[in-house]
Image: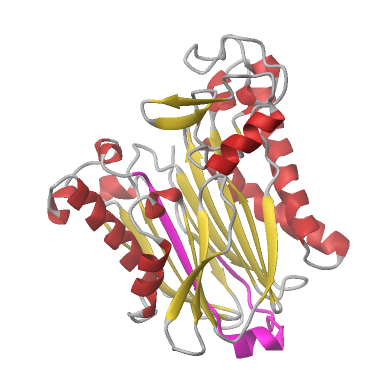
Amino acid sequence: MNLVSACWRPIEKYVQNSADVVDEGQEGLLWFKDIGQHVAGEFSMAVAQANTLVEDQCQVESAGAPLTGIFVGVYDGHGGPEAARFINDHLFHHFQKFALEQRGISADVIRKAFIATEEAFLSLVTNAWPTTPQLASVGSCCLVGVVHEKTLFVANLGDSRAVMGRTIRSTGEIAAVQMSTEHNASMEAVRQELRSLHPDDSQIVVLKHGVWRVKGIIQVSRAIGDVYLKRPEFNREPLNAKFRLPEPLQRPVLTAEPSISAYTLQPNDRFLIFASDGLWEHLSNQEAVDIIHNHPHTGSAKRLVKAALQEAAKKREMRYSDLKKIERGVRRHFHDDITVIVVFLDYDLISKGSSHGSTISVRSGGVS
């Protein structure tokens, strides 16, 4: 357990004005917070590590005015953990800054927070280039959900996903409604977008070993970081040759412009699932929503992670109990890091639109 604990940064948590947050737990390479209270309901979190250094990061924040609800972030890193950690440390602070400046929450506030985080990470990479050039090849998907008053904002870069569990009034059944737009080259619409933006580049998307990849390298078309695919000055030595493109970079291959949507919450909107691609690789939207709907709130995120791990084991014709014995690093051959945050919605509390001064900050992630 001491060895496993070394994989995790201390969980940062502070609670004010009697907000109820239950202590975290850990089972091998699975960290979880079974249940916690936010200003408009409850939440549950869990992270399963597969990589040698966990590359997923996540956070739940509720910090008072002007935000009267909850901020949720899931950051799925690739190439290393540094970009996801950076986002976890900076994005919410940029969000707060712009929200205070504009005296409210809007899609523009969220967009500005994304762009400011991207620019700050670019500055970090630039300063570190002489000594740590590999930072130029590190990036992260970025999924953010904000519940403010009666509005849900969802912003996304990459292939993490937000799914709503909504009760169908006529039947009482639960429906899964995807709330986020994804940017993975496996999707025809994404490939078409890339080709339209790069009409002179026949290699902008390449089918490699049965997987569509941007420039034959990366699966997502939008991310924070990956600056070697955005700035020509980083597509050269001393960056490792396996990352460098053979031809000069004429224009950015990737973008950090998020897809943002706003939705007015309804009384039959029950809960939201925010999760990295590691979950959706093994569970469908409806399967995930059914699992949450058919069980108690407590332990919801952990329950989803375990369901995904059981599916991963089944695909390799092995028992879940044997999968759990596989060490981090080697585990990546069976599944990716998996992060899940489930947010339950109390419409009566949401309608009041007041945080009553409650402040919650819960974050998890790996150490170097």
Read off the magenta span: 336-361
Relative vertical location of residue 257 with respect to residue 275 in this rendering, above or below:
above
- The quadrant of the rendering that contains the C terminus is top left
- Residue name at image x 59 percent, y 30 percent: 226
Q: Horizontal and vertical percent for residue 181?
A: 59, 53
Q: Horizontal and vertical percent for residue 252?
A: 69, 26
Q: Horizontal and vertical percent for residue 53?
A: 39, 38
- Residue name at image x 12 percent, y 53 percent: 319
Q: Quadrant of residue 289?
A: bottom left
Q: Answer left or right for 6 relative to 112.
A: left
Q: Answer left or right for 61 relative to 101.
A: left
Q: Quadrant of residue 300?
A: bottom left
- Residue name at image x 27 percent, y 45 percent: 3
Q: Horizontal and vertical percent for residue 97?
A: 79, 56
- Residue name at image x 58 percent, y 58 percent: 180
Can you see residue 138? yes
Relative vertical location of residue 40 with respect to residue 67 in this rendering, above or below:
below
Instruction: Give the number of marks.
Output: 0
Does residue 17 show up magenta in the picture?
no
Q: Answer left or right for 333 relative to 269.
A: left
